[in-house]
Image (cartoon, rainbow, N blue to C red):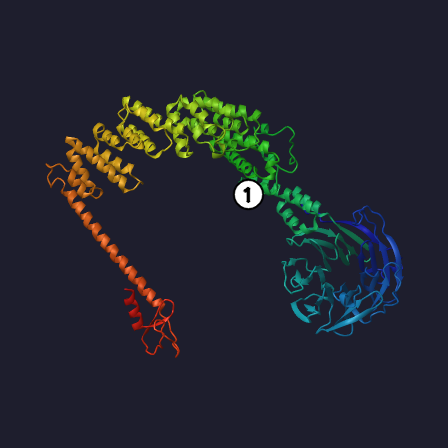
Amino acid sequence: MSLRVFTRAHAYEKQASPKEDKCSSIQCIERYDQNVYTGAKDSTVQHLILSSSTNGNLSLSGERTREGKMRKLGSGSPVTQLRVVPLFNHLLVLWDGSVRALNMFSLEPVQTLKKIQHVSLFDVCKSALAALSRLACVEMVTSSSRRKRVRIHVVGVNRWDVVKEVSLAQEPVALAVDGSCLCLATGDRYLLYDYETESSMELFPHNHNRQNIIVATAGRGEFLLNGPGSLGMFVMTTGISQRPPLQWPAVVLSAAVCFPYILVLQSQALSVYSMLDQQLKQTMSLDGASGLVPATDGALVFTQKQIVALSLVPLEEQIQALIGDQRLEEASLLLGGVQSHLPSESYEELHKLIACLAGFARFYQEAFSEARDLFIKAELDPREIIGLYPDMESCLGEAFHTQLVRVVKRKDLQLLRQADSAAFHRYLDFLGNFLRAVRGMEQGRKCAQEVDCTLLTLYAEQGHNEYLESLVASPNACRLDYCTPFLEQHHRFFALGLLYQIHGQQTDAIQMWVKIADGYHDNASCSNVYEHIVWTLSQLKDRDVVWTFADWALQRNQETGVQIFTKRHPDDRDTFAAEDIVAHLKKYPLALLLYLEFLIHELKSEEEGHHNLLALAYVTQILETLHKEGETESETAATREKLQSLLWESVFYDIPAVYEQVKSTDLCAEKAILLGKAGEHSRALQVLVREERDPHAAEAYCHRAAEGRGGELRQTLLFTLFDVYLSCKDLASAAADLLNNNAQAFALEKVIQLLPEHWSVRLVSQFLLGSLRETFHQRRMRGLQRGLAQAELLRYKVARTQTSRMMLSVDKNQVCTACQRDITVPQFVCNLKGELIHIDCISNEESTRD
C-alpha cells in the first residue's frame, strides 16, 4: 500500500475563447502565500488569489479561486519567468528579453525601476550586501542574452544597480542562487561560482537537451540537479554531496524539493520521492503538465490551461498512517528526518509510539533484550505488559484500561502456556527482567504497586527466593491485602515476615518468624531464621517489641540471643540502659557474662559494678565447669585466662570483694593476682609456691607484676621468690633454676651471702658465669661509653677551634692589653673579648693566677 503524501485539488482553470486558446496558454507561474501569478504566451500577467483553509494550506473544499488584476505587457513574446519580491511588493517579470518590475497587487509598472534589457535568465535571493547600503535589499542575478556573462544586481525599493559581472566560457541555460553561490548549467555541464570569493568549480557533465536541464535550490546551501544517467544529484555550495543520488525517470520536465520529499514532474505524471531513503512514495497522473512551483506546504503544478494545487499531508498524519500499516522502520526514518519540523511534544509522542510498537514486534519474536530497551525508550506503561499475561490481571487495579488494543496485535499467552510451557517461561523471565529494569524509573514509579505485586507473584511462583526476599526486604509498594494470602498459599512465610517488617508491622513480622523457628510453619528457603530474628531485634528501637521477644531468643540460645543488645548500632545505645539489660540478663548467666564483656571491652565501661560482676561471673562459670562432668580442661583454661587478664588489666573492680569470692577456692593464680594488686606480693608468691606448687607460675608472676614498673621491682620480686624457695627444703632445685635463669636480675654479692653452705659451685655455676659475664659486660660498657663521651668532647673542641679562626688586623699603634706595650712581634694571642696579648704576658698572667 503506497503512502499518501500529497493531496490534490483543482485550483484554477484559464477560460479562453477558441481563437485565443493557443495564444493564452500558461508559460510560467509564481506563488507567494495565497497570491499566484501566471505568465501567458500572449504577454499577459494574471494575478490569482487562492482560497485557503484556516490552517493556511490550500483548500480542498472546491472553493473557487478569485481572479485579480491582469496586465497585458505587449504582443508577440511570452512571459518566460516571474519572481516575487514581497519585501517591496515587486513582481519581477522576464518578457521580451527584459526584466521589468510590476506592483504585486495592482500590476502597475514601478516607474523608478527601469527595465533591464538583454536578459535570458534571472533569479532572486536575499542579499548579504544589505549591510553595505544600510537599506533592506535583495540580490538578483541575470544572465545576458548577448554575451556569455552574468550580472549581480542589488534591488531596492526604487532602484537596482549592477554590483558585479562574471564572464563565462559558455552561455548559461539554467541557474539558481543561494547566498553568494551560483549554480549554473551550460549546454554540456554544471558548475558552481562564488562571486564573493571569485572561485569556481566544475561539477559534472550532462547530456540533456535544454528543456530537461534542471537547476533548483534544495534547501539552505544545497542544489538539486538533473545529472547524467537519470540521476537526481544533490550538491552543496562547497561542491560536495551529502545525500545519495536519486534514480528518477529518463525525461524530467521539472523537479523541486518540498521537504522531506522531492517532486519530479513528467508530462503525464508527478512522482514523489523521499529525501530520506530515496524511495518512491506516491505517483499522481497529470495530463499535459508543464511545470511546478514548490512551497513549504505543498506545490502548484500547471498545464497550459489549469493549475493543480498539491497540499502536503501533515507529517504527523503520514507517520500515523505508516504506523497503522506496521511500516515501523519507515515511520521511524521519516520521524527522525522531520524532527526539526515538528512540535517537540508531537515528536516525542510519535517517537514513543514507534518504539512501543517496534518493542511489541520484537517481543513476539522473542527478541527480549531489544524489546525491553524499546519499551523503556517508549516509556511504556508497565501495566500494558503485565496485562498480557494470564493470571496477572489480579495485580492490576480496576481503574486501568489498556490503550494499545487497536494498535497491537496481541498473542494469546494463555494458549502459549498450554502449548509450549518452555516458551511461556521465557516470556515470564522477560516480564521479570523488564519490571526490574523499570522499577526505579519514572514509568515504573507511576504504577509502583502493580509492578511490585507482579514481581512478588513471579518470584513466589517460580521459586526465585533471593529475588523475592530482596524485594520484600527493601521499600516496596506491595499491597498487603493481595500479597499476604498469596505468600501464605505458596508457603513463603519468611518473605511474608519481611513484608510485614518493611511495612512497619514489626510485631507481626517477628511473630511470623518465631512460628517458623518453632516449627509451626514450614519454610525451607530460610535456614537461619533464628539468627535473623536476633539481628532484627538488635536493629529495633521499639523497646516493647524487643522486650517481648528477648526472653524467647535468650531461652533458645544465650550466646546468640545476647546479640540483641551487643550488636546494636552505636547511635542506638541509649535506647536500652546498661543497668536495665544487666538486671534482665541475671536469669541468663552466659548471656550476662557476654554482655559484661561487651560493656568492658567494647564500650570501655569504667563502672566498678560491671567489672565486679564480670569477675564474679568468670569465677562462677569456672567453678561450675570444674564440677561438671564431660567438660574439657581447655574450656576451663580459656575462661581462667579471661579472668586473669581482667584481674591484671582492670583497675576498676573491688579487690577485697573479688578476693572474698575466690579465697576459699582452688583458684590459686587468681588469688595471687588479687594479693599482688593489694600490694601483698610475698603472700601472693607463697600462694603460688606452696598452694599452687607451680614455680613457673611464680616466676611468671614476678615478671608480670613488674611489667611497666621498672627493673628494681622485678629484682625485688625475684629476690622475694628466691627467699620463699630457700625457706622450703624441697625447692632447692627451683631456687637454683631461678638463679640460673635470671642471672642478670640478681646482685652477685647478695646472693653469695644467702646461698646455703651445702650448695655446690656446680649447682649455681650457670648463675655465677652469667653474673660475672654481666659484671664484666657492664664494666666494659661503661668504659666504652666514657671513651665515646671523650671522643665527642674532643670533636666539639675541634669544631670550636675551627669556627673561632678569623683574620686579625694589627696596625702600628696596637698595644698589648696586659703590658700596654706595642705589639711588634708576629706571635700573640687573642682572648675571648677580642683583645690582643703578648704570648709572654698571657703566660705571666696564668702563673700569677696560679
Considering depth in this image, is 159 or 665 the residue closer to the camera? 665
Specify the quadrant that holds the N terminus: top right
Residue in the foreground of this view, choosing between 259 and 689: 689
Q: Quadrant of residue 122?
A: bottom right
Picture coordinates of residue 181, whole percent (x, y): 70, 66
Quadrant of res 631: top left
Q: Is residue 688 above or below residue 258?
A: above
User: Is residue 525 in view from this perspective?
Assistant: no
Asked which secondary structure carries label 1, the reply is helix
Q: Quick check: 443 above or below 488? A: below
Q: Is residue 840 visible?
A: yes
The image position of residue 431, as x and y in percent, is 54, 35
Residue in the foreground of this view, choosing between 466 and 39: 466
* Location of mark 1 (residue): 370
Give the quadrant of the C terminus. bottom left
Residue in the image at 15% along x and 34% along y: 732
Left or right? Give the position of 184 relative to 445. Answer: right
- The local crowd at label 1, few if under 14, some if 14 to 19, many if 20 or more residues have their Cα within 10 Å, is some
* Picture quadrant where residue 716 is located: top left
User: Picture coordinates of residue 235 (x, y %)?
Assistant: 66, 62
Percent coordinates x, y for residue 64 in the rendering: 85, 49
The residue lying toward the viewer, choosing from 457 and 762, is 762
Q: Residue at x 68, y 70 (%)?
A: 197
Count of marks placed on residues: 1
Judged left or right of residue 383, residue 534 is left
Residue type at the position of mark 1? Glu
